[in-house]
Amino acid sequence: MEKRLQVMITFVFLILLVAGLYIFTNWFSIITGYFTGESQQERIANCLSEQGAEFYFSEYCADCEKQQKAFGKSFEQIIKVDCGNDKENCPNVREVPAWYIPNSEEKFHYGLLTLNEISESAGCEPRT
């Protein structure tokens, strides 16, 4: 009987431990704003892709590389246009990096932008 009681106590303890970890991770993700599932980068990249937004860059542009890193793997979803070294492929673009967002008031947005700035310019809804 004593062995059975030990097994039951261990089993209940493990269930409580798993439940506690689940509650803690849920609370932690609400507090920090990090949610499992679709990340902020994925959400913004999907939104930009749906709108037909384009990212103009040059191979040797440091800010262009930083912009790409801000999106992580989600950057693969975004339409990219390589302007070349002298912007020969992009006659309408003043400088790189640049975003063309068709649904925004200003079609072109220049410089290194934060994810929030890009999201606001494109009208992508923030996660609630």
Image: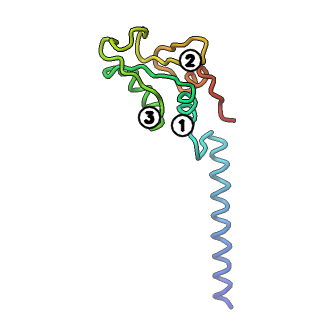
Q: At 57% across and 21% down in the image, what residue appears?
A: 117
In the rendered image, residue 68, in percent from the top left (x then y), is placed at 43, 29
User: Which kind of residue does numbered mark 2 sit on?
Assistant: Pro
Q: Nearer the viewer, residue 29 or 128?
A: 128
Which residue is farthest bottom?
1
Vertical placement of residue 34 versus 116, above or below: below
Mark toward the start of the polypeptide (2 vs 1):
1
Vertical placement of residue 10 versus 22, above or below: below
In the rendered image, residue 60, in percent from the top left (x then y), is placed at 31, 21
* Callout 3 touching callout 1 (CB < 8 Å): no
Q: At 36% across and 17% down in the image, what residue appears?
A: 83
Vertical placement of residue 7 versus 15, above or below: below
Marks 2 and 1, how far apart in space? Answer: 19 Å
Disc 2 marks which residue?
102
Vertical placement of residue 45 versus 121, above or below: below
In the rendered image, residue 120, in percent from the top left (x then y), is placed at 61, 22
| Label 2 element class | loop
Query: Could you tell me which quadrant the C terminus lies in?
Result: top right
* Callout 3 touching callout 2 (CB < 8 Å): no
Q: At 38% across and 26% down in the image, what residue appears?
A: 65
Q: Is residue 91 left or right of residue 53?
A: left
Q: Is residue 115 left or right of residue 59?
A: right
| Label 3 element class | helix
Mark toward the start of the polypeptide (3 vs 2):
3
Disc 3 marks which residue?
76
The image quarter containing residue 69 is top left
User: Which kind of residue does numbered mark 3 sit on?
Assistant: Glu
Mark toward the start of the polypeptide (3 vs 1):
1
Marks 3 and 1, how far apart in space? Answer: 10 Å
Disc 1 marks which residue?
42
Label 1: few (<14), some (14–19) or many (≥20) C-alpha neighbours in 10 Å: some
Residue 116 tag number: none
